[in-house]
Image (tube, grey):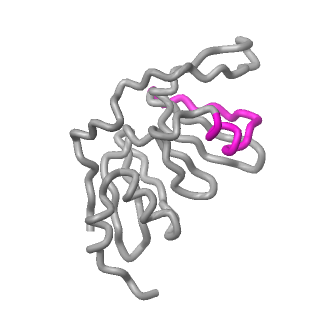
Amino acid sequence: MIFTPPLNSPAHPFPLTWPPLRLYVRERGKQHFPVSSLVSLQSEGNYSWLCWADGRRMLMPRTLKWYMEQLPPAHFIRFHRNCIINRHYIQRLENSKAGHIAHLSTGETLAISRRRWRDVCRELQLFGEAERTPTHGW
């Protein structure tokens, strides 16, 4: 089963007008990065990979919990214990026997945990469709 988020979501305008992330980059010092071009954040221990729309990846010494407090909650969704996604880069969601998968407009595919599947669908206004999804017995 494949779901696509509605194109006309008036509750969540884009482009995002949120203060930029202020990050310290070793080579350049403090830098400001627009939140709207942040595609995903993935944790690796007490570090986080920040993935940007232009393909850059940055390893930063902060936890996902710290970033969740810095990011606009209406625009970022927790997919997994170690993954946060910008809702504007989600192209479609897929519910298959292999699990729940999100396809991003950058070409990446990321797994969604079973426990968070309904919350993700609800936040993307697909809850009614997720309820009709056949469940797979494992």
Q: Number of labelled discs?
A: 0
Q: Which residue is at 26% across, 53% downward? A: 4
Residue 136 or residue 5, whichever sits in front: 5
Q: Position of residue 25 (x, y in %)?
A: 71, 20
- The magenta stretch spans residue 67: yes
Q: Quadrant of residue 48?
A: top right
Quarter of the image with the N terminus in it: bottom left
Residue stretch rendered in magenta on the structure: 54-69
Query: Residue 110, relative to residue 85: is it above or below?
Result: below
Q: Which residue is at 34% across, 57% downward? A: 93
Residue 15 or residue 106, whichever sits in front: 15
Query: Residue 15, relative to residue 123: is it above or below?
Result: above
Q: Position of residue 119 (x, y in %)?
A: 45, 60
Q: Position of residue 83 (x, y in %)?
A: 57, 50
Q: Position of residue 78 (x, y in %)?
A: 54, 51
- The magenta stretch spans residue 125: no
Q: Is residue 99 left or right of residue 5?
A: right
Q: Is residue 44 left or right of residue 76?
A: right
Q: Which residue is at 70% across, 39% downward? A: 66
Q: Residue furthest front?
A: 11
Q: Which residue is at 41% across, 60% downward? A: 101
Residue 111 or residue 88, whichever sits in front: 88
Q: Quadrant of residue 16?
A: top left
